[in-house]
Structures are given as C-alpha cells and as structure tokens.
Image (cartoon, rainbow, N blue to C red):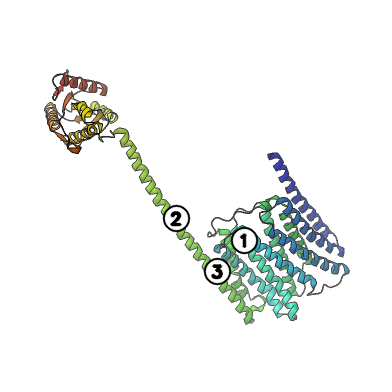
C-alpha cells in the first residue's frame, strides 16, 4: 500500500516537472527564434496553464479548489489577450492601446485578486494584524516606487484620460496583487513547494510588469521588452507547475507567532520605509519641483510611519505577553519545584517515620544507632532503651483497635515530652518503643527510666471518656564502646525480657563487661 501511494506521488511530481521542463523548452525556443511568429509561443504557455490547473485540481484535490478555479478562469482571458497581442506582433502592426487585450489583461488581474483573496483566507484563517501591517508596509514601500517611476511620469505625459487611466490601472492592480502576496508570505510558517511556486508566479509577474511599464512611462517606450515577455511566460509556467505539484494538496501551515519580527524581514521593511526620503533627497525626476508629487510621497511616508508605529506596538505587546508568560511559567516552575521538594520531604519522612504516631521507625533508629555507636567511648557513652507496654493487649481486646491506636499516640506524646530534643524516640511496631540517648552517664539513664515509668503509669483519658491504665517495662543497654546496632538491640531486648519476667512496670539494665 505504501509503495502504491509512493508511486502515485512520484507520478504527480513527474507531471509537474514534465510540464515545467516542456514550458522551459518553449521559452528557450522563444529566445533563440527571431521570427515574429515566436510571440505566439506565449499563447501556448498561457493557454496550457488553464489545462494544467484543471488537471492539477482533479489529480491532487487541494483542500479548497475555488482559488485554483479562479486562477484558471483568470488565465483564460489572459491567453486570449496574449493571442490578440501576438497576432499584432506577427503582422508587425502596432497593438491598439488601450484595446481589447488591455481590458482582458486587467480582467484577468481582477480574477487573480479574487483567487488570491480566497487562497489567503483559506491559508491564513482568522485575521492576523501583524501580518497585515507587514504587508501594508511592503505595499506602501513599493507604491512609492510605482508612483515615482510609473504613475507620476504617466500623469506628466500628454496621454488622454482613457489611455492614462488604463496605464495607471496596471501598476495599481500590481500593487493589490503584491499586497496579497506579501500577506500570504507573512502569515504562513511552513511553506509547501506548490505555495512557493505560487508566490514565485506573483513576484515574477509583478517584476515583469514593473520593468515593462516603468520603462514605458519614463522613456515613452518599453525597453527590454523581450525580458518582460520571458518573465510573463515564466510566471505563467510557475502557476501551472504549482497546480500540478502534489504538495498543492497540503496547505501551508499558519505561522504560530505572527508578532515576531525576523531580522531579514525587519531589514526589508526598513529599506522600504527609507525609499521615500531617498527619492526626495535624490530629486529623482525633478520631484522637488513638483509639489503634488512631493505631497503624495510625504503622504506615503506618513502612512509607512503609522504602520511602523503600529507594528512596533504589536512587537511591544508581544514582548510584554512573552515576558508575562515567562514569568507565569517561572512561578509555576518554582511552585512545582517547591511542591516536589515538599513531596520529597514527605516521602522521606514517611520512609523513616511511623505513620500512626509520627515517631521514628526502625529504619531511622538503625541509621541513628549506627552513627551513635561508632562514636561511643567511656567518656562519651550512649544509652538504648527498649520499651514494651504492659496490658496493651487487654485495651485492644476490650475497647477496640481504634482506642488502642489513640492510646499509642498519647504514649508517643508523653515519651517525647520526657526526653531532650536531640534524643530519638522510635516506635518499632505494635506496642514496642525505643529511645536512643547520647552523651549520658549511668545516673542519667536511671533518671530517664524513672521519668518514663512515672509518665506511663499516670492514667490516660481517651475519647468517649475511656480511662485507661497501662504500664511499661524497659530494657536498658548502656554503651561505652563501639558495637553493632544488632548487638545493641539484642542486648536491650534481653534486658527488657528480664524486666518483664521480674514483674513488669520496671526497668532492667543489661549486665556486661565494658
């Protein structure tokens, strides 16, 4: 299936390149032939564009066929106009101006405009003010050139009203097409080959028009007419190739950030903005002695300045929005990191503490015990107390586990209240507790056991008015030399067993030679 699709795609690509190659051969023939009949070759190309567009739409099925149908409709009168113009050239006669051919050409430009507006709306979607402003700056910049080199010379000529109107209509329609081309360029991000060929068609068409009408306006006759003729044929060829290329089925992607101003675009816009002042400073065409033309140039400069100010406002707004978004993301990231740190702290606490009482668990006791035992000596000794509640099972059996849990929480509270801040109180499980104290002597350990026994003996008042009496047995291991945690726990547990068997509610010290 993939190979079939690849074959179809390659076939469509081949159609586009075959058409472009054949058209190029026709153009080369035009350049190499001196006969006046060669002007009919332009008819061959312009007429072929109509067929190429219809075939391309049928084969490639673009997302919107309407713009391409409008382009095909525009090329039909364009081809007829080329035929009229070419027949006059073959006969060696002057082409009537303005004549039917001019009306057909201008009608084609109107249809081109309609097609480009439709295409722009399909590609650009919603209105993008930043792209419109950039397109406006480009249009006004080239309008300054068109006024200086085409429109103003025509106005100074002795042409009658109707020929002058038709002469001026060409650069005006070109400016409309240029504005749409600029809008398309500035509002699209990823551009397909078909889209680029379509833009190339417009640019080559406008450049050819500008060369032809610019030299005709300033010199009274079109210079380098063959260059313009080749340009018109190349532009038509590009339009037909764009329709035949398979990428016409993929619309170009809309630019994500219209508000940005790439350096290359900024350079182009600045050059266009400076065009008016340079024309006045260079006094092109003696413009300083023509108040009306100076007024028009100044008006265009004012319009360019306004568009530039609005564009800068968009850039400032975009920069502010970007800064606000970055600040929001930074705050969110800070909050996330803080939350992560708190969660890490909570997880670390849960890994080393008993969930019911909040005391240290066996893992944390072993960790602290290992550190403390490594530092023990006869001058800096430590003590490990193992506690087991007497009568706790009866509380669970008679009052329930919830009351038993409440009792364990109260016992933990009493134990932490009877020791120093640096001492470690741990719950080992069930009703077993442990206490690690450092830097104490034997008498201090005896005081600890007495305080703990007295605190546990006092009655506990629990929820629902339950009064509970329990006691505890304590096994004490005084450490004055480095031993392993397992040895310390084992010895303390041995002392606890002795306290239990001796009658409970008392403390027993482990007897050893230290």
Asked if one can make out residue 375 in the rendered structure from this viewpoint, the answer is no
Mark 2 or 3 closer to N-term? 3
In the image, 419 versus 454, the foreground residue is 454
Vertical arrangement, residue 463 with respect to residue 80, above or below: above
Q: Quadrant of residue 53?
A: bottom right
Q: Position of residue 38 (x, y in %)?
A: 85, 62
Vertical arrangement, residue 267 with respect to residue 306, above or below: above
Please name the residue that numbered disc 2 is placed on. 325
- Left/right of residue 119 with respect to residue 350 in the rendered view: right
Q: Position of residue 130 (x, y in %)?
A: 55, 63
Numbered disc 1: secondary structure: helix
Please name the residue that numbered disc 1 is placed on. 121
Instruction: Give the foreground label among 1 and 2.
Output: 1
Q: Residue at x 73, y 65 (%)?
A: 208
Vertical arrangement, residue 414 with respect to residue 301, above or below: above
Mark 1 or 3 closer to N-term? 1
- Left/right of residue 226 with respect to residue 326 in the rendered view: right
Please name the residue that numbered disc 3 is placed on. 307
Numbered disc 2: secondary structure: helix
- Left/right of residue 213 with respect to residue 425 in the rendered view: right
Give the CA separation, mark 2 to mark 3.
26 Å
Numbered disc 3: secondary structure: helix
Q: Position of residue 7 (x, y in %)?
A: 73, 42
Give the CA separation, mark 1 to mark 2.
29 Å
In the image, 380 versus 135, the foreground residue is 135
Give the CA separation, mark 1 to mark 3.
22 Å
Q: Quadrant of residue 182?
A: bottom right
């Amino acid at each position: 299936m993939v190979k079939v699709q690849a074959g179809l795609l390659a076939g469509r690509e081949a159609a586009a390149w075959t058409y472009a190659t054949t058209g190029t051969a026709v153009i080369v023939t035009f350049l190499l032939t001196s006969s006046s009949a060669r002007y009919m070759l332009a008819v061959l190309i312009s007429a072929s564009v109509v067929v190429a567009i219809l075939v391309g739409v049928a084969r490639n099925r673009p997302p919107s066929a309407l713009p391409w149908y409008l382009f095909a409709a525009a090329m039909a009168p364009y081809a007829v106009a080329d035929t009229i113009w070419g027949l006059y050239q073959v006969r060696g006669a002057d082409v009537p101006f303005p004549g039917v051919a001019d009306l057909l050409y201008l009608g084609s430009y109107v249809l081109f405009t309609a097609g480009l507006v439709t295409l722009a709306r399909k590609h650009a979607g919603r209105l993008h003010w930043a792209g419109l402003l950039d397109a406006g700056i480009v249009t006004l910049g080239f309008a300054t050139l068109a006024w200086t080199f085409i429109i103003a010379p025509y106005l100074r000529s002795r042409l009658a009203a109707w020929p002058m109107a038709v002469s001026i209509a060409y650069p005006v329609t070109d400016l409309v097409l240029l504005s749409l081309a600029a809008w398309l360029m500035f509002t699209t991000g990823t551009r397909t080959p078909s889209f680029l060929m379509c833009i190339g068609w417009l640019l080559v068409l406008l450049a050819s028009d500008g060369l032809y009408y610019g030299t005709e306006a300033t010199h009274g006759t079109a210079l380098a007419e063959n260059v313009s003729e080749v340009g018109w044929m190349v532009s038509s060829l590009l339009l037909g190739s764009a329709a035949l290329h398979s990428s016409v089925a993929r619309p170009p992607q809309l630019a994500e950030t219209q508000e940005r101003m790439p350096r290359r675009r900024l350079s182009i816009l600045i050059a266009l903005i400076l065009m008016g002042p340079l024309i006045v400073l260079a006094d092109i065409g003696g413009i300083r002695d023509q108040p009306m033309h100076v007024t028009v140039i100044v008006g265009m400069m004012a319009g360019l300045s306004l568009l530039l100010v609005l564009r800068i406002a968009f850039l400032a707004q975009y920069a502010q929005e970007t800064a606000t978004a970055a600040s929001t993301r930074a705050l969110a990231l800070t909050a996330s990191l803080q939350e992560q740190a708190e969660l890490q702290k909570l997880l670390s606490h849960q890994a080393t503490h008993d969930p019911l009482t909040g005391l240290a668990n066996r893992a944390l006791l072993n960790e602290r015990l290992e550190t403390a035992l490594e530092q023990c000596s006869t001058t800096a000794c430590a003590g490990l107390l193992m506690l087991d509640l007497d009568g706790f099972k009866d509380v669970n059996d008679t009052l329930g586990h919830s009351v038993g849990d409440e009792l364990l929480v109260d016992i933990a509270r009493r134990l932490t209240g009877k020791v120093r801040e640096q001492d470690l109180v741990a719950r080992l499980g069930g009703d077993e507790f442990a206490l690690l104290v450092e830097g104490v002597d034997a008498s201090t350990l005896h005081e600890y056991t007495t305080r703990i026994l007295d605190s546990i003996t006092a009655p506990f008042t629990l929820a629902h008015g339950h009064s509970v009496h329990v006691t505890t047995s304590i096994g004490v291991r005084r450490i004055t030399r480095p031993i392993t945690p397992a040895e310390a726990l084992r010895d303390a547990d041995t002392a606890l067993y002795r306290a239990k068997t001796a009658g409970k509610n008392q403390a027993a010290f482990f007897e050893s030679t230290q």
